[in-house]
Image (tube, rainbow, N blue to C red):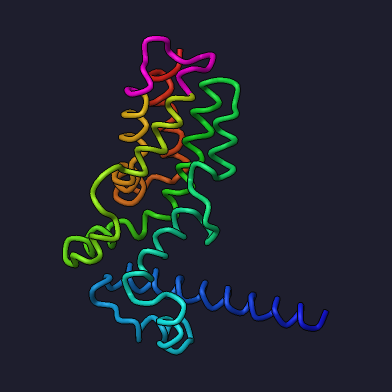
Amino acid sequence: MTDVKRVNKRTQKAAETRRRILEAARDLFVEHGYGATNLQDVAAAAGVAVQTIYFVFGNKRTLLKELVDVTIAGDDEPVATMNRPWFRDALATDTAVTHLAAHIRGTREILERVARITKMVATAATTDAEVAQLWPAGGDPRFEVHAVAAKSMVTKPGARAEVSAEHAADLLYALLSTELYLLFVHERGWSPERWEQWTYDTLLPQLCS
């Protein structure tokens, strides 16, 4: 039992260290930019040795990649968005209207987390080719998530019969974009709740009868 407790304490300490490093990296990358922040700055803010960051994450680029992945997910569990409870619960709803509402709510919660780092990542990718390679060109995971939601939504009672899954996916992809969220919430000062309601009110007549 004593050995188990020691293992649990080590695991908890490692998780706490990882969390502090990610939080420090997020704040410094957003405030100063990815390129202007070095790992010594992150280590000092997190209260760890810089060697600890190398041990846990490998290098600065993998730290950034992990930061983005954890921010999108909301935790460090290796579970894809489409396997997350909120997404599975939305798929399980009985009507297109309830599915739409649940999908917008779940997406909003992701956007609230990622909005702070979106511009920073985009800037880093344009100035650092190795950062850009962390997200290679090809299929867009965000579109794939909305496409799966749309394919399910259009088959449910209350969906507009003339709306195809492809068209529904395009609308979800566009209106639930990070860019539009940042425009309303960060530039125009809307609350996330107001953005969620506007998005729902806008998409409802487009997708549901």
* Residue positioned most to the top: 161
Report whether 14 appears left or right of 35. Answer: right
Q: Is residue 209 above or below residue 5?
A: above
| Residue drawn at 45 percent across, 89 percent down | 49
Does the magenta run of residues contain 157? yes
Q: Main secondary structure of the magenta part?
A: loop
Q: Is residue 91 above or below residue 188?
A: above
Does the magenta run of residues contain 44? no
Q: Is residue 163 above or below residue 102?
A: above
* Numbered range of the magenta stretch: 153-167
The quarter holding residue 31 reads bottom left
**Image quarter (top left, top right, bottom left or bottom right) of the C terminus:** top left
Q: Nearer the viewer, residue 19 or 32?
A: 19
| Residue drawn at 69 percent across, 79 percent down | 9
Q: Residue 202: where, in percent of width, then height?
A: 38, 26
Q: Nearer the viewer, residue 194 or 48?
A: 48
| Residue drawn at 55 percent across, 45 percent down | 84
Q: Nearer the viewer, residue 202 or 150?
A: 150
| Residue drawn at 56 percent across, 20 percent down | 95
Q: Residue 101: where, in percent of width, then height?
A: 51, 30
Q: Is residue 160 above or below residue 193?
A: above
Q: How many marks?
A: 0
The quarter holding residue 194 reads top left
